[in-house]
Amino acid sequence: MDTKSVSIENLSKCDGQSVKLQGWLYNKRGSKGLYFLLLRDGSGLVQCVVNQSEVEESAWRVAEEVTQESAIRIHGTVSQDDRQHGGYEVHVSDLEMISKSEDYPISPKEHGVDFLMNHRHLWLRSQQPWAVLRIRNRVIMAIHGFFQSQGFVQMDAPILTGTAVEGTSTLFEMDYFDTTAYLTQSGQLHGEAMAMAFGKIYTFGPTFRAEKSKTRRHLTEFWMIEPEMAFFDLEMNMDLAESMLQSIVKNVMELCESELAILQRDLEPLKMVSNPFPRITYDTAVELLQSRETAKMFDERQRNLEAELHSLDTEKEEKQKRWGQAKKGEKRRIDTRNNEIQKRTSEIDEELRNLPSWRESAQGFEWGSDFGGSDETVLTWHFDGPIIVHRFPHGFKAFYMKRDPEDDRLALGMDVLAPEGYGEIVGGGERATDLAFLEKQVKEHGLPPEAFRWYFDLRRYGSVPHSGYGLGLERTVAWICGLHHLREAIPFARTMDRLYP
Ligand code: 4AD
Ligand code: MG
């Protein structure tokens, strides 16, 4: 048989035809004389039906022997079946083993996330990571599409640098011949140089933070997209961030419907992204945190979570009672649901434990401090979609930020906060243009002026108003996918305690 091989995602173009498929066994069910093989080839899943009376003895033996994640080649005829994965099914005429897999460690039963992260090199083959990382791909393409269509040029900033961008406390240091180099925290400073040469640019690259924090919002290596635009003020910068995010989310909702369905993502909050993002100043945000309204929201949240916990408990007890008499199929459904309940329960437990300290932080918030992760979460409770907070006290902001001409205590920064507790996904602002001011800032921030000599040149030779921001790719993907932790938004996460696989 010399049929050309097709990929599963293209089966809809092959209805009624005989095809060759190559991939791995995802799952297998069988009864007398009949096997249902769920094949995955990277592009999707399809059920392949093997009927003993319709195949050679050797093919039947493969169907009997094939184990989870064995590599196989299948010949068969495609037929439409709306009940199946992807709407198609393959009736097998021949089956070959390419390579048998023994004792694949990830079974369909639920594993803990630590176990799965330790087996990330294999876990990538499962449906959930597959859906997430396909969405990541879509987000990346949407970002390029958006900027390219707006006349931006993609420019790479160096990864090895001699300058700190975002403070000195999170730098990864390394020996660089006779001097010290750092892994870049942000491509921004080089982005500014490129914007003066090309007008509107964006960088897209890995960035590094030696962050000694183990929160679910931090990676030590993450990807950042940093547009930088000459002649853009803060207002234009916010407009750009808003339309970029709208374009990304729209793209994903249009082109990743099935991936979002696999993740059981609630689409309502994503639809809200098409509305204008409310823009509030830092001052207003602080008032909001301290407000009576926020206090009420805490009470309500606590009540709702407790009620949800109670109803999950009840459901679990009922399921437990039924389990004894349940048939195999129902047992499997109960197990799956129990795992979901377990996961949600521990999320609720975690939040209930956190609420008192979140409340203290929000209600006792003092003007002049930076928002913590929980403060960002609480702020977004007040809104349905993303919001933009702007004009922060300059004390906790980077040296390069322009001061607000209306109020010298403030820097012209802006952050976009994603809803549903995801917090900051974009950080940026308008840049200082005055050489003397920047020289002073570098000194006050304890940075070595020599390292910034080249950067100061940008203010010497035709300094113009300009702005930019950084979008965290993993934060964006985690939010769009509804993931609890950033580590699942990148193929191989790097955190304080993870360098493998
Ligand atoms: O707010 P940040 O630190 O801003 C900058 O680096 C600016 N120089 C960007 C610019 O104006 N060109 O980081 C920008 C974004 C954050 O909003 C967040 O989404 C992401 O980068 N980010 C992280 N993502 C994962 N892990 C971390 N440790 C991150 N730190 C920042
Ligand atoms: Mg920030």
Image (cartoon, rainbow, N blue to C red):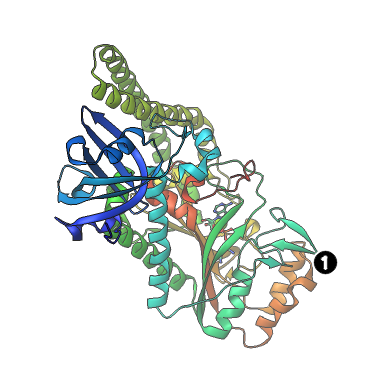
Left or right, residue 468 beside residue 340: right
Q: Is mark 1 within 8 Å of ligand 1?
A: no
Q: Is residue 383 visible?
A: no
Residue plotted at (27% across, 48% down): 268
Instruction: Name the one closer to the observer, 81 or 196.
Output: 81
| Residue 150 position (above or below residue 41) | below
Q: Residue furthest front?
A: 57
| Residue 29 position (above or below residue 485) | above
Q: Tell me the quadrant of the picture where the C terminus can be found.
A: top right
Q: Position of residue 97 (x, y in %)?
A: 37, 44
Q: Amino acid at mark 1?
A: Phe
Q: Which residue is mark 1?
A: 177
Q: Quadrant of ligand 1?
A: bottom right
Instruction: Name the one closer to the observer, 419 or 13.
Output: 13
Q: Position of residue 470 (x, y in %)?
A: 52, 63
Residue plotted at (77% across, 67% down): 443
Q: Tell me the quadrant of the picture where the N terminus can be found.
A: bottom left
| Residue 441 position (above or below residue 342) | below
Q: Secondary structure at mark 1?
A: loop
Q: Position of residue 498 (x, y in %)?
A: 62, 43
Q: Is residue 96 visible?
A: yes
Q: Quadrant of residue 209?
A: bottom right
Instruction: Name the one closer to the observer, 305 or 479.
Output: 479
